[in-house]
Image: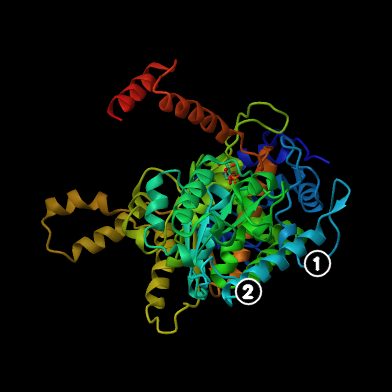
Amino acid sequence: MSLKKINPTQTKSWKKLLKHFESIKNKKIEDLLGSRKSPVKFNLVWDDFIIDISKNIIDNTTLELLLELADECNLGDAILKQFRGDSINETENRAVLHTAVRTFKKDSININGKDIIPSIFETREKIKRFTNNILNGNLKGATGKPFTDVVNVGIGGSDLGPVMVVEALKHYCTKLNTHFVSNVDGDHVFEVIKNLDPETTLFIVVSKTFTTQETLSNANTIKSWLTKQLGESSVSKHFAAVSTNQKAIKEFGINPANVFPMNDWVGGRFSLWSSVGLSISLSVGYENFSNLLLGANKMDEHFKTTKFDSNIPVVLALLSIWYNNFFKAETEGVIPYTQYLNRLPAYLQQAIMESNGKSVDRSGNNISYQTGNIIWGDTGTNSQHAFFQLIHQGTKLIPCDFIGFKKPLKKENKQHDKLMSNFFAQTEALMMGKSEKQVLEELKQTDLSAKEFEFLKNFKVFSGNKPTNTILIDKLTPKSLGSLIAMYEHKIFVQGVIWNIFSYDQWGVELGKQLASKVLREINGNKISSHDKSTEFLLKNYLSNS
Ligand code: F6P
C-alpha cells in the first residue's frame, strides 16, 4: 500500500503552527529555557545517546503542535508501511527495506510473494566468509600473495557510505589498507593505484545498476592496469563485485564466487548495510561490521516503537521542519567533534539532499512550500576556524547539529577535554551571544580611546539565539555509529512523509547523465551539434585545444 497523500500546509496543526510562530519567533532561547514544563521532553536519553534539544527556539506548544502535525500527516501509518515492505517508493514501484538488511530477527518480510529474510542472512554469511578468508590469507592474489590493500570502486551511494564508515572506524581497522575510487576523473584512479602492488590488491566494483559511467570507466581502467601486469586470468582473483546486474558482472569477467547481490528494495544511498558494505567489513573485520548493523537495528526498533515525543528521529525531523518551513532557514550544519567523522557531512549531503530535494508532491503536483534542506558542515574544532564566523554573526539562521563523544578512542589522548570544552562552549556561545552591555564591560578593561571604543563596540556584539541540537554519545564505536547513521536515515524519511514527497527516488540526477553521454559522443566525433549558445561556445573552445 502507498503512503497517504496529505498536503501538510492544509492541516490544522500547520495553521496553528503559523500562528504560534508569530508569537515565538522573536523570543530568546535563554528565556524559553526557563519557561518549559514537563511532560514535554527537551532532553532525550536513549541507549548511550543524549539528545539535547533545549537550545532551540521552541516551547511546549511548539513541540506539541509539531507532534500534532506528525499525527495529522499519518506518520505512524507511513512507518508501519516502510518496515512492512509496502511499495512506498511509488515512482519506481519498489519497497524500501534498508532496515531489513540490518535486522537480526528472522520474521518474514515478503516482496512479491517471496520472503527476503533468508537471502539477507545468506548474504551476510557470505560477507563474513569472504572477509575472514581475505584476512586470514586463505584467499590470495593471482601470484599466491595475501592481500594487503582493498579498493572500493563505486560512486554516490556505492561510495559515500563505505568511505564515511571506513574513515569513521579507522581506529578499529584490520591489517588491510582500504582505498576508494569514485570520480570519472581518470587522475583520481591513477592517483590511487600508483602506489599499489597489483599482486596484493583486491578491487571491489560496487554498482547497483552496473551501468554507471564513472564506476565502469574506473573498473575498466583498473582491469587493463592489472591484466597488463598479471595477465587476463588475474581478473577472477583480484576482482569482486556488488550489484543487482548479474549479467553485466559476468560480462566483465568477475568470478561468481566473488559476486555479492544487491536488491532493488535497498536504495543506493541507504545501502552501506548491505553487500555494499563489503569494503567496511574488510576494513574493520566482520564482527565490527555486524556491530554497525546491530547499532542501526537498535535505532530502527527505537524509531518503530517509541512514542513520537521521545522518538529521536521524529523529534529531530520536526525541529528541522520548524526551521525550514516557518523560520525559512535554508541550510543546516552538521558539526561532528571527532576527526573520524570528517566524511559524515558529505555522506549526509547525498542521503538528505538526494532524498528530499523534490518539488513535486506525492500526487504529482508542484509544491508551494519548501522541502529538502541544504546540508553542510565539517569537524569541530577545524570548522570553528573556518565558517563559524558566519554562523555566529552572519545574517542567516543556520540550525546546527553538534555531535560529540564523551570518551576518546586513543588511550594516550590527553586532549579530549579541550576538544569537548569547545563543543560545549560553541553551542552556549551560539545561544547566548554577547550583549552590548557585556561588550562595554569588556572594552572598559582596555586602554582604547573613547572614539575607538565607540567604533568597535557594534562589531563585538553577538546577537546569539542561534539554535543547535546537541548529540552526545558515549563513545565512537561501530554500534554507536550504526545508530547515529540510522537516526539520520529515519529523520530523512519523517521529513519526506510530512512534506508529502517521495524520498526514495532520484530522477533529478538523470538529465545530466543523459546529456553527458550525448556530449561525449560529440567530443569523440569531434563534431558539436546544436546546444545553447553558451555550451556551444565552451565545447568548441574545448575541442580546439584538445
Ligand atoms: O547519482 C545517482 C545514483 O543513482 C545514486 O543514487 C547512486 O547511489 C549512484 O548513482 C550510483 O549508482 P550505482 O550504484 O548504480 O552505480
Task: Name the side, left or right, on which 166 lies relative to 47.
Answer: left
Coordinates of residue 313 in the picture (x, y in percent): 65, 56
Q: Looking at the image, tell me whether mark 1 or mark 2 is earlier in sequence order.
A: 1
Residue sitting at x 64%, y 74%: 287
Question: Dividing the image into four equal quarters, which quarter contains ligand 1?
Answer: top right
Tell me the residue at 26%/49% (across/down). Answer: 458
How packed mark 2 is, by other alpha carbons closer than 10 Å (few <14, some 14-19, many 20 or more), is some
Camera-nearest residue between 322 and 509: 509
Q: Quadrant of residue 474?
A: bottom right
Q: Is residue 467 visible?
A: no
Q: How is the image coloured?
A: rainbow
Q: Which residue is mark 2?
A: 132
Instruction: Indicate the quadrant where residue 242 lies.
Output: bottom right
Name the side, left or right, on which 2 lies relative to 371.
right
**Mark 1 element type:** loop
The CA span between labels 1 and 2 is: 24 Å
Look at label 1 and name its amino acid. Lys
Q: Is mark 1 within 8 Å of ligand 1?
A: no
